[in-house]
Amino acid sequence: MKFTNIFLLTFLVFSMVLSAPIKPLPQSVKVDRKKVVLGHKLFFDPRLSQDGTVSCASCHDLENGGDDGRKFSIGVGGKRGNINSPTVYNAVFNFRQFWDGRAEDLKAQVFGPIENPVEMNMTMAQTVDTLKKDPMYVSEFAKVYSDGITQENVADAIAEYEKTLITPNAPFDRYLKGEKNAISPEVEEGYKLFESKGCIVCHNGINVGGNFYNKFGIFKDANSSALGRYNITKREEDKYVFKVPSLRNVALTAPYMHDGRAHTLKEAVEIMSEHQLGRYMTEDEIMKIVAFLKSLTGEIPQSVKKRN
């Protein structure tokens, strides 16, 4: 009986997958360009942290997958976090933000890292005070927002910039659009295995994940110290329940899982097969799925390329 709710959820999601499998990313999303320019400056500004050493870009390296490549991120004063930093790329397509889903959108997410004592260790009020001391920011905010620099406007500008961080034209996206030679026969076989083995039940839609919650450790105890959604809801059934991560650009975002336990894609697939699917996969099957996952690597935005 303990798996009843999980199987019901799986059935409902699988039904959804049948009508809405993986979809290609759009070339762009609608944004306010003036807000984007301002948000870009804020995203890379370490003054948003208590000691002036950590910016949003510190944990979300846009030239290397949109995360920081660490098991746990390093914040102000060398403090180490306790959960793996997810990529900011394509985060606009996630139905919630953070592993535990505590932020409803990108704008709400901005407050988290800035006010986290282990990350940037600033209150939003302090952030506003800091920015008001810079004539450039005072002038730029005044051009975009009628009420100038406020907590809401800081979050809004950063979120607007993050909306632009999408990575279209992955080989698999091109394949979905009809360019059949965009992927190899091995990748195509890997995708068929991704479907038949059940991976696609959780990793589907435009972001190949990021669209609902699931328990980590369905068929085998995950031995996780992080409690996921339970921290928010305090409901026993939400222990070890996390937002399913997007698999877009996953080849660039090691280590994997909320606790960074998997160092390679091969290891990640093995763990998922054992803990989430409860089934054995051969070495050949795993490597074909890995090949498929690599085909989800898209193009970084032009605005990021121009920084090089």
Image (tube, helix red, strand yellow):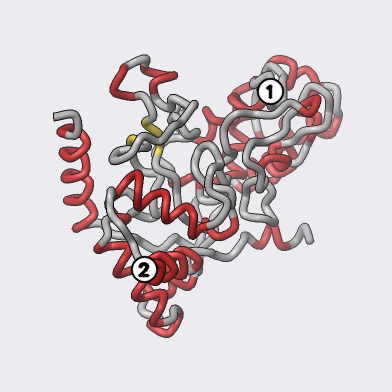
Q: Left or right: 3 with respect to 182? A: left
Would you call the spot at circle 1 few (<14 residues within 10 Å), some (14-19), or many (20 or more)?
some
Give amino acid for label 2: Glu
User: Residue tagged by mark 2?
Assistant: 285
Give the residue drawn at x 68%, y 19%.
117
Q: Quadrant of the C terminus?
A: bottom right
Give the residue drawn at x 49%, y 26%.
225
Local SS, label 2: helix
Q: Is residue 234 above or below residue 3?
A: above
Q: Left or right: 245 with respect to 145? A: left
User: Residue tagged by mark 1?
Assistant: 118
Would you call the spot at circle 2 few (<14 residues within 10 Å), some (14-19), or many (20 or more)?
some
Give the residue drawn at x 39%, y 54%.
208
Which of discs 2 and 1 lies nearer the camera? The answer is 2
Tags 2 and 1 touching, CB below 8 Å: no
Q: Is residue 306 above or below residue 237?
A: below
Give amino acid for label 1: Val
Q: Quadrant of the N terminus?
A: top left
